[in-house]
Amino acid sequence: MSDEHAGDSGDDSGPNSDARPIVYDLAPNCTADDVETDAYYHAVVNGVVEYGIFVDISDSVSGLIHESNLSTDYEVGDRLVVRLESVRENGDIAFAEETPDDYRTLTVDHEPTITPISDLTVGDSVTVEGVVTQIKQTGGPTVFRIADDSGIVAAAAFEEAGVRAFPEVDLDDVVRMAGTVEDHEGTRQLEVDGLTVLDDETAADARQRIDAALDERAEPEPVEPLVEWPAFEKLRGDLEDVARLLRRTVLEGRPIRVRHHADGDGMCASVPVQLALERLITEVHDDPDAPRHLFKRLPSKAPFYEMEDVTRDLNFALEGRARHGQRLPFLLMLDNGSTEEDVPAYENLAHYDVPIAVVDHHHPDPEAVNPLLDAHVNPYLHDEDYRITTGMMCVELARMIHPDVTDELRHVPAVAGLSDRSKAEVMDNYIALAEDEGYDREQLLDVGEALDYAAHWLRYNDGASIVNDVLNVGCDDEERHRELVEFLSTRAERDVDRQLEAAEPHLEHERLDSGANLYRIDLDKWAHRFTYPAPGKTTGKLHDRKVQETGEPVITIGYGPDFAVLRSDGVRLDIPRMVAELNEEVVGGGVSGGGHLVVGSIKFVSGMREEVIDSLVEKMAEADIDEELSTTA
């Protein structure tokens, strides 16, 4: 609003002492909501009739001055000052001519009534105010997605077929849109009549208001954990931070991309989170296809975020931005992503300001990864360890995002714990919880085996439908779930037996000075390749057999040309520390890798395999026996 003096200047010692009448000069887009009776307005004559003249005080506000209220003759286009006398019930406005000798002018900008997106009703003419989250050019209109503090709506603006409407608008601009709400294929869509990009000050105020409201809506749901567990309570605050970030991401209309380890625990972590996020996306968006467009889950074969994976993810995201006008996604790493080996991939994403959160239970390198992360949940950061599996954590995370998923997830922590050999003191509680849902221990083990089997053959595909059916999360056919688990677990058991029958005779054994049994096998020579079980699984199954046979501490190494898989039972192996020492001590070995205290994998250059394995065995011989890490204790 600005002041401008007209008529005689008079005494003007300051705004507080200026008693002259005000004549309002309305902006062209002002409506009847911006006027009031007995106020003065600048007007323009738009018609002359026998009984008076019609005048405009804005593009949409017009009225009649009856001849009885006129002191002179006027022609179309003449300007004058009028007083608003009355507004009738039918909307007709009556004015009177006014000729003040001395006045001041105030310019009035239109301040429309803003309708929350959640209140939009088909058929209404409305104005919405929000942040642009997507700009998609179709063969017809330009489709914007606008998010305010209550929801998200598509808004179609037509310039001409295939031509960008309002080209001055960019992603993340704060805009005000006026139009009519229409039904578009069963969803609400705003047909845009006008759009304004708000200026800096107004945009900042709107953004602050929207941010405050979204922060409130993004608060995690206050759910009680499925089982009481003091160790887990240490992680609750960190999980709530991730839940808050994910809920806020959904409310903002930003895509989410999940990467998870391709094993039982990784799937027990990612599938519940997927179910919760897709349900929240469905609630926030009118578009029934929104979950498909805004959520993507992909497995990672490696125990870290490989450059191959991040390059694919980044290329997919950039194509989505170019083709569909989307923001770049939020990346969620599950059962993976805590180590120094993840840093190059994260640094690649940092060039594009992609936010990243990690929920993992592998031994972390917080100094390396935390500067690149928006959130990091890991039991080791709270003096806990791998027995708190990622699947256990993510079931609680999913419930914080959308508590309605709880009834479908009660059996999942037990599957995760058994799949990842957790020795958590609450495993019996989780198994009892699953038993209440109709699963005994053997059935839970079968589900985990079926998940691993499916993950092996799916390779880099998420296998959404089959994985959901195997885990019985988001599955609509209980009988199919039971039959599928029986089939896949039986096939997995058959393939494991065949593999072990071929490999076990070639195990090399030695007794270490500590008293532990060391078994090693060259998997490249003595195991079937490119089939199930993979080297890691083969090593694990051989290890389990020897643990049961001996009832003593056992270490097993399965190796190939440039890798080794490590398992231990009853022996405290600090595998991340061993890897760091090997990398320094075996010059030219190119050693990398990581894992837990009892499970890990390393990579090296093939020409240095003998030196790496020999040094690794020396370190294992020095490891302490620890009955707490024994499954037979």
Image (cartoon, rainbow, N blue to C red):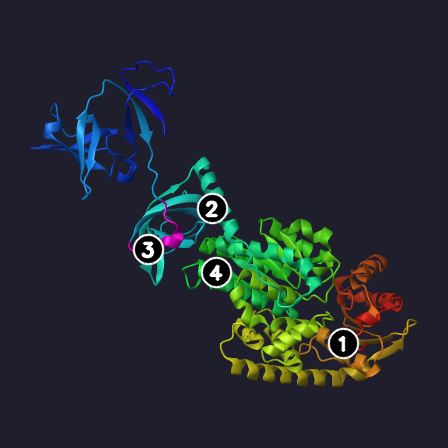
Task: Tell me which label, 2 or 4, sits earlier in the chain.
Answer: 2
Marking on residue 128: none
Task: Tell me which label, 4 or 3, sits earlier in the chain.
Answer: 3
Q: CA distance from mark 4 to mark 3?
A: 20 Å
Q: Assess disc 2: are there few (<14), some (14-19) or many (≥20) residues with their C-alpha within 10 Å of its C-alpha.
A: some
Q: CA distance from mark 4 to mark 1?
A: 45 Å
Looking at the rendered image, the disc whose residue lies closer to the viewer, 1 or 2, is 2
Q: Secondary structure at mark 3?
A: loop
Task: Tell me which label, 1 or 2, sits earlier in the chain.
Answer: 2
Please tell me whether residue 117 belongs to the stretch shown in magenta: yes
Disc 1: which residue: 523
**Residue type, numbered disc 2:** Ile
Q: Assess disc 4: are there few (<14), some (14-19) or many (≥20) residues with their C-alpha within 10 Å of its C-alpha.
A: many
Q: Assess disc 1: are there few (<14), some (14-19) or many (≥20) residues with their C-alpha within 10 Å of its C-alpha.
A: many
Q: Secondary structure at mark 1?
A: helix
Measured as percent of width and height from the top left, residue 81 is found at 22, 26
Quick check: can you spot residue 271?
Answer: yes
**Residue type, numbered disc 1:** Leu
Task: Tell me which label, 2 or 3, sits earlier in the chain.
Answer: 3
Q: Main secondary structure of the magenta part?
A: loop
